[in-house]
Image (cartoon, coloured by chain):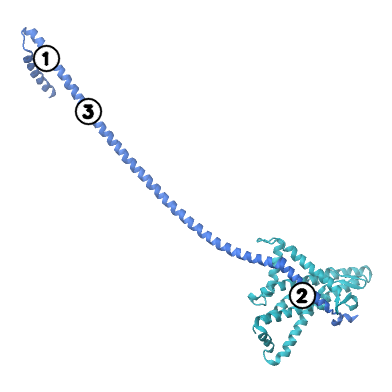
Amino acid sequence: MGDPSSVPTFQLGGLTFNVTNMISGLIAFVLVFLFVFALSRHITMKPGRGQNILEWLVDFTNNILKGSIPGNETSAFGLYGFTLFLFLFVSNELGLFIQISLGGKDWVRSPTSDPIVTMTFSLATLMIAQYAGVMKFGWKKHFSGYLKPFVFWLPISIFEEFTNFLTLGLRIFGVIYSGEMLLKIIGEMAFSGGIASFGVAVVLALVWQGFSAFLGAIQAFVFVTLSSVYIADKIEID
Amino acid sequence: MFSHLVVGASLFFGDIIFYAVCFLILMWLIKIFAWKPINQMMQDRADKISNDIDSAEKSRDEAASLAQQRQSALANSRQEATTIVDNAKKQGQQQRDGIVAQAQTDAQSLKVNAQKDIEQERQDALQNVRNDVADLSIEIASKIIQKELSADDQKALIDSYIEGLGKQHES
């Protein structure tokens, strides 16, 4: 449980792959794709129910981006924000419904309860932010932004980038991981001491699952919001 | 037991590649199957709505101008109808007057003719009577005086007598 030994791994080309993450991630990817695919089948001028949901979601993520990225530049990041939000949301909620452990090893859980996954996305966001800054201002002007307000600020600017990267990834990881941990502990408690503890555990599990579902949605929203803030920071003139 | 709290212990860098690739594929699929058509449709809808607003504005103007035209046409036709009726009345009046005048003329001429005829009749009758009276008088006179008077003398006599009668009668 969170133990390196509790997840199945394999080596390929000098890299270690975590099979749990791969299975869970694939499930999340497929779920997101099926959801979007199913809702986008009959796209008409007069939207049906599925199309309405999808358009609402598109508007929702676009509005998150518009909150920080200035006007007409939002469209370039719309697809990233949309996909990111859906994937993180599904990943956060996945572990609440499905957790499979076989032979002492986890096979399926929330992909976002592993820091490597969340940091992958925070790294992606930071890279997109750098890329957007370079595309907009050119190499020289973009990196001269690190020397503001004065040259000796450079270490702090670099350190800030690093902390942005870490906090963005670890925030969502922490919330989801702790949520799953607590669920597992409640689950262990349920079978530890007869009918009384089982009843208490069921109530606790229900409450905590509801709260975690809420937290998962909030964290997906926060992640996309912060992503847009970091991107906006790089494409706005100081 | 606390080994999971050491972040580095469970980081497998292969996962980064796996997730990056999968995420790109997912983004690409969503772009093809949903993002593009949805955005296209939203754009189309925005265009359509603005077009509809424009065309509604236009058709409202058209309707207003049509109503205006209809109103004026109605007023025109009313006026026209009034003119037609007036004309018809005037014509009818004229015709009536003509007919009445004609009838009066006809009646007048008929009356005149009739009077002329009557006068003629009367003259003829008077002439006949005069002749008959003359003949009768001659006969009577010839029988009375047993003497043959010439018819012409007799007639002149009778004529003067009858003329005297006629005058007395007329006065």
Gap between marks 3 and 1 measured at Cα: 31 Å
Q: Which residue is mark 1?
A: B134
Q: Residues within 10 Å of mark 2 (few under 14, many from 20)?
A: many
Q: Is residue A226 left or right of residue A2?
A: left
The quarter of the picture where the C terminus of chain A appears is bottom right
Q: Is residue B46 left or right of residue A179?
A: left
Gap between marks 3 and 2 measured at Cα: 128 Å
The blue-tinted chain is: B
Q: Colour of chain A?
A: cyan
In which chain is the residue bearing label 1?
A: B
User: Mark 3 belongs to which amino acid?
Assistant: Asn
Q: Earlier in the sequence, mark 3 or mark 1?
A: 3
Q: Which residue is mark 2?
A: A219
In which chain is the residue bearing label 3?
A: B
User: Mark 1 belongs to which amino acid?
Assistant: Ala
Q: Percent position (x, y) of residue A92?
A: 80, 72
| Label tally | 3
In which chain is the residue bearing label 2?
A: A
Contact between labelled residues 1 and 2, with CB atoms less than 8 Å apart: no
Q: Which residue is mark 3?
A: B113
Q: Percent position (x, y) of residue A225?
A: 72, 76
Q: Residue furthest front?
A: A13
